[in-house]
Image: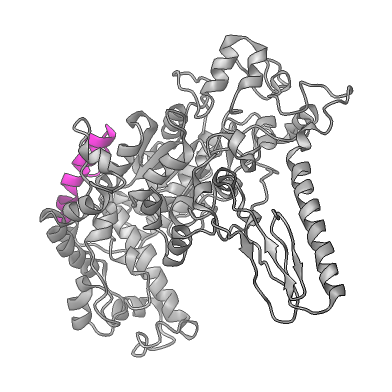
Amino acid sequence: MVSDFSKILPPNISACIASPPLDIPAMVRITREGGDYSSLPSRTSGIPLSTQGVDIELPPLNDDEDSEADEDEYEYDVYGVQTSNPFKIWVVLFVSVAAVVVLPLAAITRFDHGNENEEDPSLDDTSYGIVFPSEVLFGAASSTPYDTRSDFRNEIGNVPPYWEEMEQTVDSKNDASYSDVSSWGPCYPLNEQVNWNEQVVAESPHRYNNDAITYKASKNHGKTPQASFYSGNDDISHNQNLAGLCRPGFLIIGQAKCGTSSLYHYLTGHPRVLPAKKKQIDYFKYLSFKPMEWYLSNFPTAQTFLARGALMTGESSPSYFPYPEVPHMIRERTRATGGPHPKIIAILRDPVSRSMSSYQYSYVVPALKMIMNRSKNTKAKNALANVKEGMSEEYYIENHLFSFDELVRAEINVLTECLWCGVAEDMSREKYGPPNGIYSNDYLDPSSPLTLEIADEFCYGEAVSDDVPLLQWAELIQQNPDKILVGLDYHLIRSIVGRSLYSLFLTAWYARFPKEDIHAICTEDLHFEPSATMLNVSRFLGLPDFDFTNVTDEGMYNVGFNQGYDTVTTWDDIENKTINEQDSEDQDFANIGYDVSISDELRDELTDFFRPYNEALFELIGKRCQWD
């Protein structure tokens, strides 16, 4: 399993994971010029002195201890001190012994903080300590954050993720059993005392809104032992670093350019849902070398979460959608065997409209920025040599950018050969299937046969030359030497069409998560029936019914002509922009703000190309989107 994840990380991170700094030698003797020294390691068995220097002797670390250790516990620069001055040697000895004695005591004090007032008779056991404060948080009174009669199972019988154990405890009507719960909803139990009465009062003005949320300060985890990715992630008794952190109850996985920003803001507008520090964390794709402690620090702390009566938090990262290793990693890192896990939400847009949006967002906008800021872009210096300065955007688009038609036809030629001839299927099986791939068991299970066709990874080939980034563009570049591709983000431009083949990506998600825990939304439904669509989403998540009208009436987020994850555009502005740019009798709200022209002939070709993949998608998700 370790080797599987190391394959998907950048080379420098892969090397770190392949050889993590776990095997600290028993004897460390490293010399720095000048006779100075750095901090000492946290465990020292003895410090024998010699006239030549100080040798620090370390016992080998126990594997079990190290698996839960923060990397700060072993990332030390350890130096011997070369000096013939006895006074300097004894100074170093004194500092060394002090560090060895004081630092462990500080660590013990830190982790034993929860018991420091244990004998104080003035403390109310129901409000302080690490036992779940049910008498403060639970009840039917308006002053308590949670109503146990209705909060833990919604109108259609769904329970929010991670609340199953608490719901069963409530149903047992046994107050003593609260001391045995392993999870406080989605939050890990605290290891420090909290005055919950004061906490609830302090959070009352912010209950059911997203103001003044507290998040744990995240550490800069540059290097992390591989074992800490997994060990203790689902058992707080084995990983105190997770104490007081809360897990996401939902993950919006994409696809990109389908409305993930609007969906996320609408969902966090539900009064029982708290947002993450930012909408898009990208942990399971780009930051997975950091431990779960870092990831969970992006969500509200247990004190804020519980005192406000929240039922859920979550994030939205479209980077998760196209990569088969991501659902596997999420499953491994967020759930214990047979235990709970986040629910998955996918939002999917008419593939023709999504492809047009991707062309504009991934190619046209970055290309124009590169032309306008040519002095700051050394990579594009040669590519822009024949491009005049000071011209209009319209001039550059017409004379120096490839059209949507040109890029799409070139890509379809590649995809047709790769997908219809079985190249992607064969290469996907070789990498992800038997005997050692992360989906080996799925391929071998006759009850749920899996077929992966990872076009994004296997259909586009490698670079041809500095002037021809990919083979699929060789002919285009030869025929149009003054048009620009060099210096841009090739992996997005190459797959304008491929990333709209949703069924090829979602297959891996359904292989790792139960069908009932994945909810697919058609973007058009979110645009034309936002309140009804959001009610269905909240019911799927186990949330109480809520009228989203006031939330969705604010408008749409991160639309084409007003970009930014948190930037909202009102419905009036959207309608005015659409009417000004399009025939008022044929308004296409799914393609708002994009001046991408497409011929009827190409639209028909794309519709025919997408049709079999759309049908496979509808069968997979159990519903149809009105795209044809």
Q: Position of residue 166 (x, y in %)?
A: 57, 21
Q: Toward which corner of the image does residue 268 lie, by quadrant?
A: top right
Membership of 390 in magenta stretch: no
Q: Residue at x 85, y 68 (%)?
A: 91
331 and 479: which one is in front? 331
- Whether residue 497 is visible: no
Q: Residue at x 51, y 45 (%)?
A: 315
Residue extent of the magenta highlight: 604-628
Q: Main secondary structure of the magenta part?
A: helix
Is residue 497 rendered to the left or right of residue 280?
A: left
Which sits in the foreground, 269 or 421?
421
Measuring from the top left, give residue 167's x and y in whole percent: 55, 18
613 magenta-colored: yes
* In the depicted structure, whether residue 585 falls above or below residue 473: above
The relative height of residue 465 versus residue 40 in the rendered view (above or below) is below
Residue at the spot x=49%, y=23% of the render?
A: 159
- The location of residue 35, given as percent across then percent down, is 75, 78
Q: Nearer the viewer, residue 240 or 290?
A: 240
Image side of residue 560 versus residue 224, left or right: left
* Residue 3 showing in the rendered view: yes
Residue 255: image location, x then y, percent: 36, 49
Residue 343, placed above or below residue 90 = above
Residue found at the far left of this picture: 421
- Quarter of the image containing the C terminus? top left
When asked about the image quadrant of residue 92, the answer is bottom right
